[in-house]
Image (tube, coloured by chain):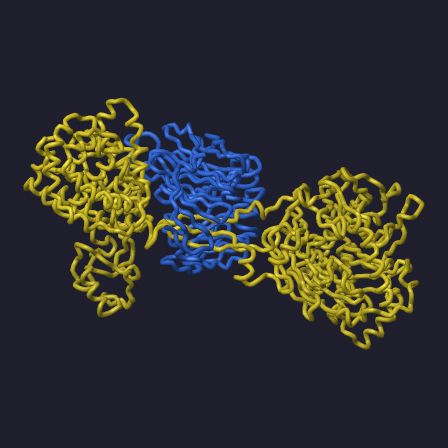
């Protein structure tokens, strides 16, 4: 089996230099000696490689099968390792050391290596490794510092082969050389790494973690306080209960010692001032503990070691005197490392800082390629076979899951195994060329086989889109960009230019997850030419709600609405005016005529045409047509424009005008009186409105005329048509009465009380509110005041008010909001203005809070509100600087500030007014 | 009908999972798998990065703005099982509270209507929903509804503040007696409505069943002048339902299928006046829907991500009825 036996005549295919090692005369010299000792020659290397490839081929043919399964162990596992046949796994722990066969459906215990009545501490394993070339060879690292090798080929029950008792403290890691059968490496808490030749009784060479840091010895070799410390620590340890029972772990021991040392130093050494500064040595001595050692797959002579102080060292196996390279990889202990299985010189390291870092070791300085941030400290890291960017990690505490990461996507694990109930302590891919089987051992005393396809995939569960409707009707939408777009548009994550990621993805079916992802965030506007809620702001600002006669308010608001292109709303205002402004209140009845002739005329007319459009659809009686016979010819001309108006309306509240008519009609139609009036008054009204007038204001922006409104009308009204015959009959009067509405004076003639319309108006308000135009509902409510208030229940009113006020505040229309609050009659709403109205004032003289309500400060007995400019008491608006509390009349202060920015009171303060 | 006014370069290093505009529509908060939450000023089509909040240790799924009357407060929830409440103080954003009461990824956060005080609902993959109530002086009281949804809760959305019963009897000055309600959607394909009992405990009030796969998002429509309660829900099964409740007791909810999409529907979002619903599906597409007069939901536009201008299409309601 030995490579030594292999032919010496082999010409080395690769010199050390070619392997990335810097050829130096002295090193070659000293190295060759060691190499010969170990049997490590270049020729051996090539031979081993050949052998390795054969093994691979042999294994490559077999296909692994199995399922996600687990079995219970008797004790918590500390480490696992897989045999090269991928059919057996060894589990090692403090009180367990067993080999299980991995069968199709289950794990079967095959061998218990923990034999003997009273197992020694040598069997308390911190790590285990199965040789990847020799199925019979295993090595364990014991917590007492012993390295044990096991030969399964031994006939006796005890398979223990060799015992190396060279380490002083727990051995954290053992590692076989990937191609040399008899080379074993160990890394221990005592800070040393040892290389063993299994054919010899002791180590071949020792590597010290601190070898490069010249002049600093380990703490126990320091002179001066050596005699003191052991005594002290022994005392403490003796007292410590768990140590007494032999249950204390190394780390705990250390903690105790450390505490003892610190205490001792503080109490004894520091006052005496005799001893060197201990903690420094503690720091070096402590942090040099080796956590992991791994032979490089790429470089025959190289191995990496990780340390508790965050360092990673690269060693040449032939050079125990100094490391090749050292760099700080993590903040805090580096618990693990793993070389990339493909020949790339990538090293993944995981640390307590919760990060996994991938280093490119081929460059002169180790270059950080990727950094994955996990949730908890990283205990183990293992590259996933056949997936060059994937690695599996498990954590040392808190988190029990195993994650598989795509290093290019460092934030979301590509897959997650959640089977374990306690910390996962060992992970191993079952076969070096199979990416789908992962084995794991855990503190929960179970051994698991995970199938990749059964893994939960957080990426898949993640929401790839964000959507939000903004206040102004704009839409923020974030969505995942396609991989190709990501590649072209952004800086790629990896420096690996040879294989563009999007290209590679297609080639590699073994990687089911998107490598990297990014999102594009766009803000859309849902209405062209400005924000969709502009009308709301404009309307709110310009509406007049009080302080003028009702008719004027209505006219004003109608005008505002019309100017904003909201014809339906404008029309509603006009109608309200018509309904509620009885002639008696107005100076002349003619006013309504003049209004009709003015701007609002077109709108009234438009409505009547709308109704006519509707009438045939409803199959209404011919009487209606007849009654409007003379207007029909005009209608034809206007039809299209009327539709246009409708469409404009639709942009804001689609189809809203239609049901408005419908609602109005629905109510009115019940009264017979109305349509009696109809024929008389429609005729005289029509000629009054000259057609060209209204043709002008109509905009022709919207070219296409969707069939929407007509259809909707049909649908909206159909239930009524299909109802009883009485309903049908009532529809006709509805229409005629509607056109009647546009003839304002006709109503006065009929002396209908405004109350008559209250139901109608109520329904209209409800309609607007339902459409989301609570603004209209509230505005009408305020403007009409008592006229409608009693018809709408208090709760609804209050709801409208609060909704509207809330909206106004969102748009920062504080003044409007305040006005609405003030004008509201609902008690719950109007009390909003009384909240937070306390104003705390300081006296401008003595700077103390004014307690009394008067103008005179009761402390200094002077009037507080004196104008600093004119020295008179301010009785109106008092403005003051919050910095110096001096102020005065608004006008005076404003004038003063034009000339100077200093306080007019002469206090020297640079006053600020916002 | 729909056009891009602003493409925000977020510089997020991974997928963005949520984007939320604040109360005044001036700031946009985004969160991403890269563990960061970013806040942008998007006034006038601009995009100024205001803050880059780091504190989560996993992908951040969702963000939520609190009502400005409590200050500038943003909540974020993450895969790292934490909910972080961020607060702006003197122009700088800082972590104000961290809630680590869940055993699994927290998927959704939503602030209650401001009338109730500062209350945050958080839905988690551990199936629980927790409610954080600010009790003053930096203290948060936690109530937890365990096992709200088996397998996990994906979305929470509060009902707008509506005062039950007659207001006239309310003595003025006293705080009205609100009934607090919210909706949640989960991996059990259900939408559940929760109501706070008089003793302060949360009780399941309704179970809405129509989806055949995980419910991805629920959105309770803002009640701007609406007499009915409306909830929109979307699911992994590609369907979007509009749930309405007309009766005063709030017990009868009827679903109406808005549309069946071919892909997962991730989000539903109501416009401020609750008359337009934006729906985003797995095909990177946003559609806007509006209820027509006859009660049919009509698609009024498509928004395709990555394209400048969108085709506006009016689809008749019948098409979506099936």
Q: Quadrant of the N terminus of chain A?
A: bottom right
Q: Quadrant of residue A335?
A: bottom right
Q: Quadrant of the C terminus of chain A?
A: bottom left
Residue A178: x percent and y percent? 81, 58
Relative to A848, is A894 on the left or the right? left
Relative to A36, is A534 on the left or the right? left
Between B151 and A885, the one lying in front of the other is B151
- Can residue B3 be spotted in the picture? yes
Residue A392: x percent and y percent? 68, 51
Chain seen in blue: B
Between A425 and A53, the one lying in front of the other is A53
Chain seen in yellow: A
User: Which residue is outermost to the right?
Assistant: A155
- Can residue A225 be spotted in the picture? no
Relative to A616, is A107 on the left or the right? right
Q: Quadrant of residue A912?
A: bottom left
Between A136 and B262, the one lying in front of the other is B262
Residue A801: x percent and y percent? 28, 40
Residue displayed at 79% across by 47% down: A62
Above or below residue A890? Residue B284 is above
Residue displayed at 28% across by 52% down: A701
Relative to A888, is B243 on the left or the right? right
Above or below residue A859? Residue A625 is above
Residue A874: x percent and y percent? 18, 57
Between B159 and A12, the one lying in front of the other is A12
Above or below residue A665? Residue B277 is below
């Amino acid at each position: 089996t030995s490579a030594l036996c292999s032919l010496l005549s082999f010409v080395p295919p690769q010199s050390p230099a070619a392997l990335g090692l810097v050829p130096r005369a002295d090193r070659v010299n000293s190295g060759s000696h060691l190499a010969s000792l170990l049997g490590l020659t270049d020729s051996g290397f090539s031979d081993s490689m050949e052998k390795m490839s054969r093994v691979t081929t042999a294994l490559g043919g077999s296909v692994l099968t199995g399922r996600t399964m687990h079995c219970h162990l008797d004790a918590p596992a500390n480490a696992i390792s897989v045999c090269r046949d991928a059919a057996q796994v060894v589990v090692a722990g403090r009180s367990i050391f067993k080999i299980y066969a991995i069968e199709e459906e289950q794990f079967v215990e095959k061998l218990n290596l923990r034999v003997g009545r009273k197992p020694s501490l040598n069997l308390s394993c911190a790590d285990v490794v199965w040789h990847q070339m020799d199925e019979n060879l295993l090595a364990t690292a014991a917590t007492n510092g012993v390295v044990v090798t096991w030969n399964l080929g031994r006939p006796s029950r005890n398979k223990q082969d060799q015992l190396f008792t060279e380490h002083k403290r727990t051995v954290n890691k053992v590692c076989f050389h990937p191609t040399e059968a008899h080379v074993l490496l160990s890394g221990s808490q005592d800070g040393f790494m040892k290389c063993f030749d299994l054919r010899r009784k002791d180590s071949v060479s020792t590597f010290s973690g601190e070898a490069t840091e010249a002049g600093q010895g380990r703490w126990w070799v320091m002179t001066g306080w050596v005699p003191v410390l052991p005594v002290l620590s022994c005392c403490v340890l003796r007292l410590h209960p768990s140590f007494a029972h032999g249950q204390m772990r190394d780390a705990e021991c250390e903690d105790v010692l450390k505490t003892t040392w610190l205490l001792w130093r503080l109490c004894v050494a520091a006052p005496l001032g005799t001893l060197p500064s201990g903690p420094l040595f503690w720091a070096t001595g402590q942090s040099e503990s080796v956590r992991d050692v791994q032979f490089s797959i790429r470089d025959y002579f190289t191995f990496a070691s990780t340390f508790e102080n965050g360092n990673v060292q690269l060693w040449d196996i032939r050079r125990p005197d100094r490391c090749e390279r050292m760099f700080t990889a993590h903040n805090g202990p580096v618990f693990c490392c793993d070389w990339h299985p493909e020949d790339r010189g990538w090293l993944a390291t995981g640390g307590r800082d919760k990060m996994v870092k991938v280093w490119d070791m081929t460059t002169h300085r180790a270059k950080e390629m990727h950094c994955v941030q996990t949730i908890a400290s990283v205990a183990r890291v293992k590259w996933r076979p056949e997936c060059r960017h994937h690695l599996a990690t498990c954590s040392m505490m808190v988190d029990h899951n195993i994650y598989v990461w795509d290093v290019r996507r460092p934030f979301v694990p590509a897959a997650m195994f959640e089977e374990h109930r306690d910390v996962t302590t060992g992970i191993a891919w079952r076969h070096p060329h199979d990416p789908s089987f992962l084995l794991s051992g855990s503190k929960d005393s179970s051994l698991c086989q995970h199938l990749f396809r059964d893994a939960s995939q957080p990426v898949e569960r993640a929401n790839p889109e964000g959507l939000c409707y903004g206040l102004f009707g704009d839409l923020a939408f974030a969505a995942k960009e396609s991989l190709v777009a990501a590649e072209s548009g952004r800086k790629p994550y990896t420096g690996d230019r040879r294989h563009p990621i999007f290209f590679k993805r297609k080639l590699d079916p073994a990687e089911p997850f998107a490598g990297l992802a990014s999102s594009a965030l766009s803000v859309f506007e849902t209405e062209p030419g400005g924000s969709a809620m502009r009308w709301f702001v404009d309307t709110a600002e310009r509406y007049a709600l009080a302080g003028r006669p009702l008719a004027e308010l209505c006219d004003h608001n109608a005008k505002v609405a019309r100017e904003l292109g909201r014809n339906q709303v404008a029309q509603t205002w006009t109608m309200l005016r018509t309904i509620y402004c009885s002639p008696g209140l107005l100076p002349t009845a003619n006013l309504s005529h003049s209004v009709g002739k003015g701007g609002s005329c077109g709108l009234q007319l438009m409505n009547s045409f709308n109704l006519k459009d509707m009438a045939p659809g409803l199959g209404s009686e011919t009487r209606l047509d007849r009654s409007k016979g003379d207007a029909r010819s005009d209608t034809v001309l206007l039809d299209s424009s009327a539709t246009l108006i409708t469409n404009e309306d639709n942009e804001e509240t689609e189809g809203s005008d239609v049901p408005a008519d419908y609602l109005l009609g629905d109510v009115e139609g019940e009264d017979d009186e109305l349509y009696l009036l109809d024929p008389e008054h429609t005729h005289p009204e029509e000629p009054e409105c000259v057609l060209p007038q209204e043709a002008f204001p109509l905009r022709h922006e919207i070219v296409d005329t969707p069939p929407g409104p007509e259809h909707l009308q049909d649908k909206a009204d159909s239930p009524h048509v299909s109802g009883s015959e009485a309903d049908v009959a009532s529809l006709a009067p509805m229409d005629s009465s509607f056109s009647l509405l546009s003839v304002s004076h006709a109503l006065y003639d009929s002396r209908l009380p405004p109350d008559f319309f209250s139901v109608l108006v109520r329904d209209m308000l409800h309609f607007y509110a339902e459409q989301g135009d609570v603004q209209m509902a509230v505005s009408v409510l305020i403007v009409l005041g008592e006229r409608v208030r009693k018809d709408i229940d208090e709760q609804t009113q209050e709801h409208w008010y609060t909704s509207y006020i809330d909206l106004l505040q969102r748009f920062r229309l504080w003044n409007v909001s305040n006005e609405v609050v003030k004008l509201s009659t609902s008690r719950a709403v109007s009390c909003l203005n009384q909240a937070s109205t306390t104003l705390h004032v300081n006296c401008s003289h003595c700077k103390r809070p004014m307690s009394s309500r008067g103008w005179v400060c009761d402390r200094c007995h002077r009037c507080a509100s004196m104008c600093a400019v004119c020295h008179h008491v301010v009785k109106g608006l008092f403005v003051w600087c919050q910095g110096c509390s001096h102020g005065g009349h608004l006008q005076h202060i404003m004038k003063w500030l034009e000339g100077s920015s200093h306080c007019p009171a002469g206090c020297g303060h640079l006053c600020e007014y916002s | 009908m729909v056009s891009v006014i602003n493409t925000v370069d977020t510089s997020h290093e991974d997928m963005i999972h949520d984007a939320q505009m604040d109360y005044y529509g001036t700031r946009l908060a985004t969160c991403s798998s890269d563990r960061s939450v970013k806040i942008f000023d998007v006034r006038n089509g601009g995009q100024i990065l205001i803050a880059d909040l780091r504190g989560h240790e996993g992908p951040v799924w969702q963000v939520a703005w609190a009502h400005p009357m409590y200050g500038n407060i943003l909540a974020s929830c993450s895969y790292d099982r934490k909910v972080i409440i961020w607060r702006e103080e003197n122009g700088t954003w800082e972590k104000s509270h961290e809630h680590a009461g869940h055993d699994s990824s927290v998927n959704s956060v939503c602030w209650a209507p401001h009338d109730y005080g500062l209350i945050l609902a958080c839905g988690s993959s551990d199936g629980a929903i927790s409610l954080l109530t600010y009790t003053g002086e930096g203290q948060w009281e936690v109530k937890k509804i365990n096992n709200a949804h088996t397998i996990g809760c994906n979305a929470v959305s509060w009902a707008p503040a509506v005062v039950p019963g007659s207001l006239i009897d309310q003595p003025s000055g006293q705080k009205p007696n609100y009934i607090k309600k919210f909706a949640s959607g989960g991996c059990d394909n259900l939408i559940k409505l929760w109501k706070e009992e008089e003793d302060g405990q949360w009780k399941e009030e309704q179970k809405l069943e129509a989806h055949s796969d995980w419910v991805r998002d629920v959105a309770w429509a803002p009640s701007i002048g609406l007499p009915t309660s409306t909830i929109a829900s979307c699911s992994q099964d590609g369907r979007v339902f509009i749930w309405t409740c007309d009766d005063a007791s709030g017990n009868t909810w009827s679903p109406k299928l808005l549309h069946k999409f071919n892909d997962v529907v991730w989000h539903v979002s109501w416009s401020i006046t609750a008359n337009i619903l934006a729906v985003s599906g797995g095909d990177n597409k946003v559609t806007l829907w509006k209820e027509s007069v006859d009660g049919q939901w009509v698609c009024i536009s498509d928004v395709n991500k990555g394209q400048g201008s969108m085709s506006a299409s009016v689809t008749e309601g019948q098409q979506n009825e099936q």
